[in-house]
Amino acid sequence: MSKPKALVTRPLFPAARAILDHHFDAEYWMPPERIPRAELLKRVAEKDALVCLLTEKVDEELLAASPKLRVAATVSVGYDNIDVPACTRHKVVAANTPGVLDETTADFAWTLLMAVARRLVEGDAWMRSGTWPGWDLDQLLGGDVWGKTLGIVGFGRIGRGLARRAQGFQMRVLYHDANRAALEVERELRAEFAGLDQLLGESDFVSLHVPLLPETRHLLSAAAFDKMKRTAYLINTSRGPVVDEAALAAALEEKKIAGAALDVYEHEPKVNPALIARKDVILAPHIASATIDTRTNMAVVAATNAAAVFEGRRPPNALNADALGL
Ligand code: GLV
């Protein structure tokens, strides 16, 4: 019996390929550049499964172009690239990769927080320029981290991971989320629930961990920056459009906040030129989950999600399992 056909938009890693090759007649997109949209639409047309990245949009157009498709598995936890209701309408299982990247992403948010507060990237550039004159008392003075207040916006697995890290730095932790956490969780993580305005007004560091939804688009806008402390830093490892980049650049220029460290951008791969020009901003290339182990695990989870559909199992991370009656 012939195997179902899969389109995989990256070569992935051997462990994930082993799963895919076992279950599917898999076609991998091998060129180093991202798969162009027209190629994606052409190649997915006769496929039963799609394993894609967050850079590929699974929307009405793609679903209409792939009538045999039964599963679209993204190798990411964020799934704003997938129109889940459209998948449901087309009876396509949509799946993501939660659970395997939380600690790694929290590590990186912490890395950015420390680096922006202590001006590490500026220091590195100075050393490489060959112009450092030697130690002096007032060089690259940054902000303290220990004992300060951390405001976590979005208190899911990654936000909670950040709260755990903050305990080691004797920080006060405020969090804001659409749903308040259970009291045991608040107690264990020593985190206080706060309204967004209170969190913005009291935090020395504001770190974003919300998914991109209509309600979270431009959550951090000019009005939000007006509420933040002038000494505060913004860290974003969630999704770029959660922050209004033009408003962020203006807030930095007007010294309404002290700095920002970003891993994600409003219009990836473009970065607002006003941010590129600034020394008080750290710019990372969307690498919060980029460790060998974690990216491998993410690819394995996505492959497993895709394979499950053809084994008659409920895919472990189906986003529309209930809607499809799985
Ligand atoms: C990365 O941004 C992810 O959503 O996994």
Image (cartoon, grey):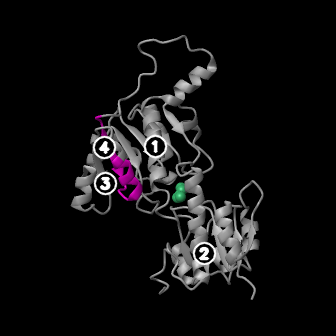
Specify the label residue 247 is tagged with: 1
Number of numbered discs on residues: 4
The answer to whether one can see residue 279 in this image is no
Q: How far apart are marks 1 and 2 (CA)?
A: 40 Å
Upstream in sequence: badge 1 or badge 3: 3
Which amino acid lies under the numbered mark 1 shown in the image of this protein?
A: Ala
Q: How far apart are marks 4 and 2 (CA)?
A: 38 Å
Would residue 39 be found to the left or right of residue 101 on screen? right
Report the residue marked by disc 2.
Answer: 306
Upstream in sequence: badge 4 or badge 2: 4
- Numbered disc in front, either 1 or 2: 2
Report the residue marked by disc 3.
Answer: 176
Pointers 1 and 2 in contact (C-beta within 8 Å) = no
Which image quadrant is residue 38 in? bottom right
Residue 106 falls inside the magenta stretch: no
Mark 1 residue element: helix
